[in-house]
Image (spheres, grey):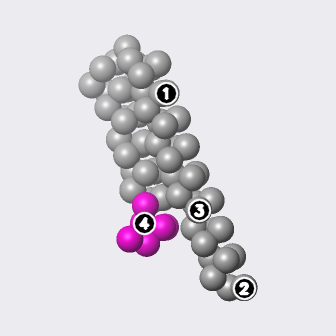
Amino acid sequence: MNHSLVLYIATCIMQLIILTNITLLNGQWNGITMWLCTGIFMFSSAIFALSRLYKKSSNV
């Protein structure tokens, strides 16, 4: 799977979580929303870092 596609999907999921929290839940689950978005961000940052390391090691 393309790494940029993973990052794009992660961004879409984060936006859907925030939209759902604001519109359907009236902002009542802000803590859970922030934890979910932070987890998705950390996952996508790890994917990005690993892809950069892989790209560097394959160029050498």
Task: Give the residues in magenta.
Answer: 1-6
Residue under the point 27% across and 25% down: 24
Amino acid type shown at disc 2: Val
Label ID, residue 50: 3
Q: Give SS at disc 4.
A: helix
SS class, disc 3: helix
Q: How far separated are the C-alphas under marks 3 and 2?
A: 16 Å
Residue found 46% across the figure and 42% down from its top: 40
Give the side of residue 2 with respect to residue 56, left or right. Answer: left
Q: Residue furthest top?
A: 28
Q: Looking at the magenta stretch, what is its main secondary structure?
A: helix
Task: Judge by depth and name the residue closer to the eye, 19 or 10.
Answer: 10
Q: Which residue is mark 4?
A: 5
**Farthest residue in the right direction?**
60
Q: Is residue 48 above or below residue 25?
A: below
Comparing marks 3 and 1, which lies closer to the viewer?
3
Name the N-terminal-most of marks 3 and 2.
3
Q: Position of residue 22 (x, y in %)?
A: 37, 26
Q: Are marks 4 and 3 in contact (CB under 8 Å)?
A: no
- Residue at 53% over, 44% down: 41
- Of callouts 1 and 2, which one flags the residue occurring earlier in the amino acid sequence? 1
Residue type marked 3: Leu
Is label 1 in a helix, a strand or a loop?
Answer: helix
Distance Cα–Cα, label 3 vs label 1 = 24 Å
The C terminus - image quarter = bottom right
Amino acid marked by disc 1: Met
Q: Name the residue carrying label 2.
A: 60
C-alpha distance separating marks 1 and 4: 22 Å
Q: Is residue 34 above or below residue 60?
A: above
Q: Looking at the image, which is closer to me, 56 or 3?
A: 56
Graded by Cα atoms within 10 Å as few (under 14), some (14 to 19) or many (20 or more), the crowding at tag 4 reads few
